[in-house]
Amino acid sequence: MSCYCEGTQKGLLRIRDVEKGGECILMLRTQFTEKVRMIHYNKTKNVLFVASRDGQFRIWKIPHEWRSKVIDEREMNAEYERRRKAKIARNS
């Protein structure tokens, strides 16, 4: 996965996908009142550390994979249809 993280003046945190031209794949509300000053990513533990100018600090566990909700919905629908057809075939 090729991503980068950026902080805004309003304290928001955006995770963007490099391979999709910087498309925002996740936006985190930090509840910071000041701008994001420090971002650190621990690759071995897959944890993101963020601090604001006023000293607030947040930590997030980042998922190993990013998937579109559309793909998840399509997979669920396909599995539902497969099970429905199998049930109909058993009852025939």
Image (tube, helix red, strand yellow):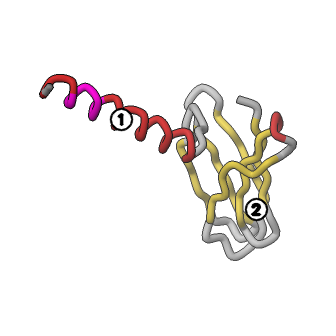
**Residue 2: x %, y % from top left:** 76, 32
Q: Secondary structure at mark 2?
A: strand
Q: Nearer the viewer, residue 62 or 92?
A: 92
Disc 2 residue type (three-letter)? Val
Helix, strand or loop: magenta stretch: helix
Give the residue at mark 2: 36
Residue most toward the left?
91
Q: Classify 10 Å Cα crowding around label 1: few (below 14), some (14-19), many (20 and above).
A: few
Task: State which tag comes first along the sequence, 1 or 2.
Answer: 2
Disc 1 residue type (three-letter)? Glu
Point out which mark residue 81 bears: 1
Q: Are marks 1 and 2 in contact (CB under 8 Å)?
A: no
Point out which mark residue 70 bears: none
**Residue 65: x %, y % from top left:** 58, 33
Residue most toward the right?
21
The structure residue drawn at horizontal position 76% and vertical position 53%, both measured from the top left corner, is 38
The structure residue drawn at horizontal position 12% and vertical position 28%, both measured from the top left corner, is 91
Residue 19 falls within the magenta-colored stretch: no
The structure residue drawn at horizontal position 20% and vertical position 29%, both measured from the top left corner, is 87
Q: Quadrant of the C terminus?
A: top left
Chain part drawn in magenta: 83-88
